[in-house]
Image (spheres, helix red, strand yellow):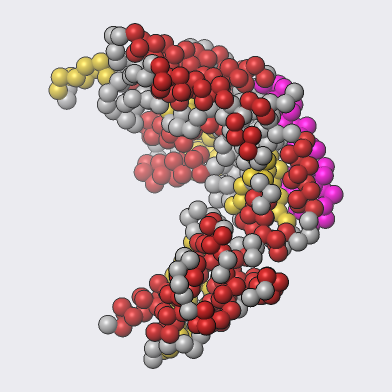
Amino acid sequence: MDSNLKRALILENYEKPFHKGLIDDDSYLKENKNNSSCIDNFDIQLKIEDGIIKDIRFDGEACAIATSSISISITKLLDKTVKQALDIIENYEKMINEEEYDEKLLEELIVYNDIYKQPSRKKCATLGILGIKDLINKSISGDK
Amino acid sequence: MNYKDDFPMLKNDIVYFDNGATTLKPKCVIDKMDDYYFNYSSNAHRGDYSLSLKASKEYEDVRTKVRNFINAKRDEEIVFTSGSTDSLNTIVYGYFKYNLNEGDEVLITKSEHASNILPWFELSKEIGINVNYIPLTENHTVTLENVINSITDNTKVISLAHITNVIGDVRPIKEITQYAHNKGILVVIDGSQSVGHTKVDVTDLDIDFLAFSAHKMLGPTGVGVLYGKYDLLNDIKPVRYGGGMNVSFVNIDEIEYKQLPYRLEAGTQNIAGIIGFGQAIDYINRVGIDNIEELCSSLKEYIVLNLKKIPHIKLYNENVEGSIVTFNVDNVFAQDTAIYLDKYNICVRSGSHCAKKLDDELGIKNTCRISIYFYNTKEDADKLITALKNNKILEESLGV
């Protein structure tokens, strides 16, 4: 993806993040996720119904990379099955960690494919999506 | 005069403006520690051979240097610790735990560093003291008047940073101690940002306890100082027991501990670090503390004057005396600004700077902090100002 397009997508999602703002509903699982080495801090909510990701919301203060990446992650993960969502997350983690990954699966999330060049930003780029992954796993273990 | 040549780190073409976090070390400090490790590595106060005696002498000489540097009355009033945090915890847990009662009040402010808040919070949970805040002025400073208005019949301690690490305001310590002592209130000072930056004379300021760190004044990490007036310090119950601090022990009823300062220096200390710290004090004395203050202050004025001209920069503390400039770039998260500046090898801190109560006062949680020391130059300031004039800081911070 062209650099200008990447920047535009990141800035758009930073300035107007998707699904920002929590809702008061006990049917959501909730988790706080923060980076101890920097100042990114998110509260994340997840709702799964019949194995489908129905809703993800977040709130908090974080840098442009962390905020845009949770925003784009949410748009990608909504309405996916739990398995599809975990697949996307696994491939995203592989991309960030410079391993082989399936580009098609990630769609816009590939805007972060150069983040490995800034090691301090890796945690920013994964903070939100790993929080969502924790919640999905919590939901799976809760179902058993 | 250009001091940069004395600092090996500055040969790397960096602009280092994070001196509030830690300062860089001149080569003489590093050499002095190397000399100990290369030529007379041994424990202090433990051996009868000449190497150990040399280590002991070098170590104790630093105690005298510290005493002279802060104008304490006796060498025994200087205790080496691992840093300000260690010193403050020893003060709170070794002295105040046994000298305060339920309902007694400690006054602090919301701009204190975590190390001058959390020990008091924990003591409050343990013994039921009350921790209350002296209100800050609209410029986030402390005035004697606000201190006076905050004191109640229950106030037993006032614990303040001399200079704060986010705002950089200089507190009127002498006036505060004078007023407090008339009311029988003790004053604890966190000197982390002041010792080595401005003249700190514990006798003139009449400070009861002072904590500071070597690494914020050209010394190595892992070394700090706990100063206390002799009688108060002598009343501290050690928070660590072990080697080096006891004279003898036979059984639980027959234990004899050493006199000050050794009673409070259990275990093998950071000998190399302490010896290096002595060189840091010598270096600061050669530059001159008044000169240091003047150099920092004029560079700060220059930076503030120029940043004020940039429309997208918001300054939070332009009216304070200390050499710290706290700012944000409009619509850019503090961390993104710091990451952007890092691309130009400019080091600034972003975040809440360990002063997590301060957002109540500033109305914003995260800021960027420029903290200046005397080796910073106008050229450093110009690089910073030029970088911050860019109106595409957010875009360029992304790194994609």
Q: How many marks?
A: 0
Q: Is residue A96 left or right of residue A16?
A: left
For this rendering, which residue is in front, B99 or A119? A119
- Determine whether B247 is above or below A56 in the image: above
B105 or B300, which lies in front? B300
The residue sitting at 76% across, 51% down in the picture is B388
- Residue that sits furthest to the bottom in the current view: A50
On the image, the x and y values in percent for residue B77 come to 46, 17
Q: Residue at x 61, y 47 (%)?
A: B349
- Location of residue B176 by image quarter: top right
**B243 and B340: which one is in front?**
B340
Q: Quadrant of the C terminus of chain B?
A: bottom right
In the image, the segment drawn in magenta is B289-318
User: Residue at the spot x=48%, y=55% of the render?
Assistant: A36
**Quarter-wise, where is residue B141 in the image?**
top right
Q: Is residue A63 above or below residue B317?
A: below
Estimate the x, y position of residue A61 in percent, counting from the top left. Answer: 58, 64
Q: Where in the figure is residue B266, as x and y percent of width and height? A: 33, 25
Q: Is residue B89 left or right of residue B375?
A: left
Image quarter hosting the N terminus of chain B: top right
